[in-house]
Amino acid sequence: MQHKNKKDLHLKFQEFVSRFGKSFCALLLRDLMVVTADPRYVEELLSSQKHIQKNQLYWLLRDWLGEGLLLSYDRKWQVMRKIITPTFHFNILEQFVDVFERQSRVLVQKLSTLADGATTVDIYPHVGLMTLDVIAETAMGVCVHAQQDSKSDFVQAVNDVTNIVATRFIRPILVFPRLFKLLRPQQYEKQMEGIRIMHRFTEQIIEERRTALQNKYNTSTESAVNPEMLDIGLKPRMALLDVLLQSTTTDGQPLTDAQIRDEVNTFMFEGHDTTTSAISFCLYLLSRHPDCQRVLFEEIHNHFGTDTSRPIKYSDVQHLTYLNCVIKETLRLYPPIPVIGRWLKEELVLPDVTLPPRTNVLILLWQILRDPDVYTEPERFWPERHLENNERANVFSNIPFSAGPRNCIGQRFAILEMRTAIVQVLRHYELMAFGVPIQPSIKIVLRSKSGVNVGLKRRAYV
């Protein structure tokens, strides 16, 4: 678990599973950790209402995300989960499709200069700027224009902190803040400066949005919105921030600015890099499997016709069956979060063993989703396996978004954004197998050391 071996983490875990079975113990520094890819154990753990605390690998996110939904637990987590859950009601998600559609159209436009049928394009950073634009607008109601200005202080801070955190994840000794500061002082300062920039930005938006909502309440009219806010891109659309500003705790008190900031930053983290990974790997798989791409394009073409200027609506992407299969298969092969962790506050009774309190547990989603005992030809990209839903998988053998009470609260948001972006790209471009293959690398979020390379060629409609 020190990761000194050059072998990638997912391959090292696969080697361990092959040698020791689906569950085994590993030493993380001085702490014993139980590692499992057994759906039986995972079901007992994730379906529990007691064992919801994340383990120490998540500590590296605390300076950035504070006590937001990802890192909080017990009563604090329960209260915030209840407050935030309505944000993902389908009525609100339907409004967000306008954002997905508009920002994915900007992506298509930015890719046009590279769509010559000859250039290798690392699609990951392009998709990353799009998803940052999406998550900023839906979480905070503000347009950061990342796709137009990728060098802005805010965009650079997001990228810097994300990359540093990713590097720390694969070097367990750097997970602990004091050791990180001691051993990597320059990286520590760069991370903290990036976090300060993001926190200042979020706090400014919170203050101005709160003022706008108070003015609206006082005058009962939309015209009370501060025009200066429109200058910095603030939108009147209901965003996660608006929900938080108008929410109260169980004792009737409004949320503090610190609570709101932590939740907004958590949503920014969880909705940016993870969705970037999912969309990028999906486009890559389609470029490497032209038969699947052809079937999907025919489905899209039959639904939308030749008018690529027609906006994508919520109802459109609900009826694309093969698209749904492609997304499910992408998430099975390349889950954005390949490893998740829990810390046991109490003992956990499993089918053939009891784990004591204070045990760290690591769940190998990558191995679970490629289990040959569950999936036919598990390494094969085969979207059709989801048409009949005839694999032998139970619920806890197919959990790219985790499962149970602490599953990913934004999974419907992510799937809807994926559907919109993939449809948008395929309506305009044919994807080709250009560049070196991916080299998956687990750095909290799944990435590729060699880039996520594709070729692009404009569609010729007749």
Image (cartoon, rainbow, N blue to C red):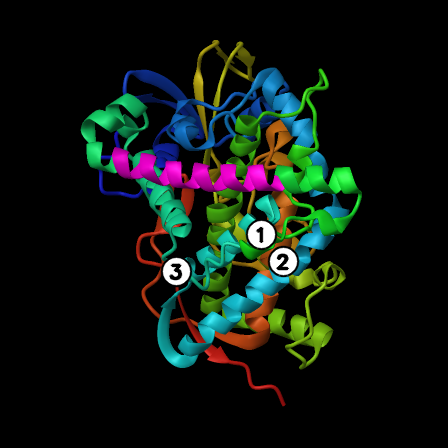
In the visual, does 424 lie left or right of 147? right
Name the residue nearer the viewer: 193 or 272: 193
418 shown above or below 115: above
The tag on residue 131 is: none
The quadrant of the image that shows the C terminus is bottom right
In the visual, does 170 lie left or right of 462? left
What's the amino acid at mark 3?
A: Val
166 shown above or below 138: above
What's the amino acid at mark 1?
A: Glu
Label 1: which residue?
A: 228
Percent across and percent down for residue 454 are: 41, 68
| Label 1: element kind | helix
Q: Residues within 10 Å of mark 1 (few under 14, many from 20)?
A: few
The tag on residue 99 is: 2
Magenta span: chief secondary structure? helix
202 part of magenta stretch: yes
Callout in the foreground (1, 3): 1
Tag 3–tag 2 contact (CB < 8 Å): no
The quadrant of the image that shows the N terminus is top left
- The outermost residue toward the bottom is 462
Tag 2–tag 1 contact (CB < 8 Å): no
Per the model, the C-alpha gap separating discs 3 and 2 is 24 Å
**Residue 265 in view here:** yes
Residue at horizontal 56 percent and vertical 86 percent from the top: 460
Of mark 3 and mark 2, the one earlier in the sequence is 2
Tag 1–tag 3 contact (CB < 8 Å): no
Of mark 1 and mark 3, the one earlier in the sequence is 1
The tag on residue 452 is: 3
| Label 2: element kind | helix
* Magenta residue span: 188-209
What's the amino acid at mark 2?
A: Val
Percent across and percent down for residue 37 are: 48, 32
